[in-house]
Amino acid sequence: MNENTIETIIRPVGADDETRWRALFAAYNAFYRASVPETAVATTWKRILDPQSDVKAVVAERDGEITGFANYLFHASTWSDRPNCYLEDLFVDPAARGGGAGRKLIEGVEAAARARNAFRFYWHTQEYNAPARSLYDTITPRSSFIVYRKAL
């Protein structure tokens, strides 16, 4: 099969995906120079698999290999009676970039947000993440909001 004819599929994460999801999540955190405690990683994984949780994940799969993931969650809004959908983490293996997986992951989360009748779908990235921003700019204009955050 020609490499160009292999399609990337987006699907909900499953219990069998834990090892690869963890490897990609670790690479994602390394990119952002972040250190996420194992307890938080384990809790996130547990939440993703819990059908009652508002934390969800999809993966990009190409030729049987998971090449990326998107973790997202739904939360209440003070501006609507419908939930917001926040895409918190998005990562594609550097070896698999350029094939459209990032866009497809965003579209997969957007489809989930529409299915839940979300009021808003949003995400953010670092200013220095030019490759991601060049993709995001083709999907929607960036907002004028500046994020302030304080670790507690």
Image (tube, rainbow, N blue to C red):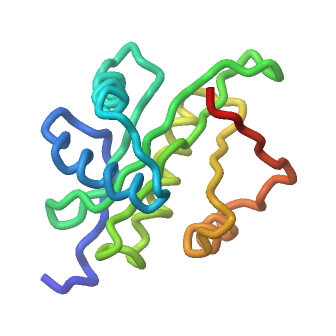
Quarter of image, res 78: top right
Q: Residue at x 59, y 37 (%)?
A: 86
Between 33 and 17, the residue placed more toward the observer is 33
**For this view, does 97 lie left or right of residue 124?**
left
Quarter of image, res 57: top left
Q: Residue at x 41, y 58 (%)?
A: 91
Q: Residue at x 36, y 51 (%)?
A: 69
- Residue 137, position in %: x, y? 69, 68
Q: Does residue 7 sit above or below 90 in this rendering?
A: below
**For this view, does 42 lie left or right of residue 58?**
left
**For this view, does 48 lie left or right of residue 108?**
left
Q: How many marks?
A: 0
Q: Quadrant of the C terminus?
A: top right
Q: Does residue 62 sit above or below 41 in this rendering?
A: below
Q: Residue at x 73, y 21 (%)?
A: 77
Between 86 and 23, the residue placed more toward the observer is 23
Q: Residue furthest front?
A: 152
- Residue 58, position in %: x, y? 36, 44
Q: Does residue 32 sit above or below 4 in this rendering?
A: above
Quarter of image, res 119: top right
**For this view, does 73 lie left or right of residue 63?**
right
Q: Quadrant of the N terminus?
A: bottom left
Between 128 and 119, the residue placed more toward the observer is 128
- Residue 133, position in %: x, y? 64, 68
- Residue 17, position in %: x, y? 18, 43
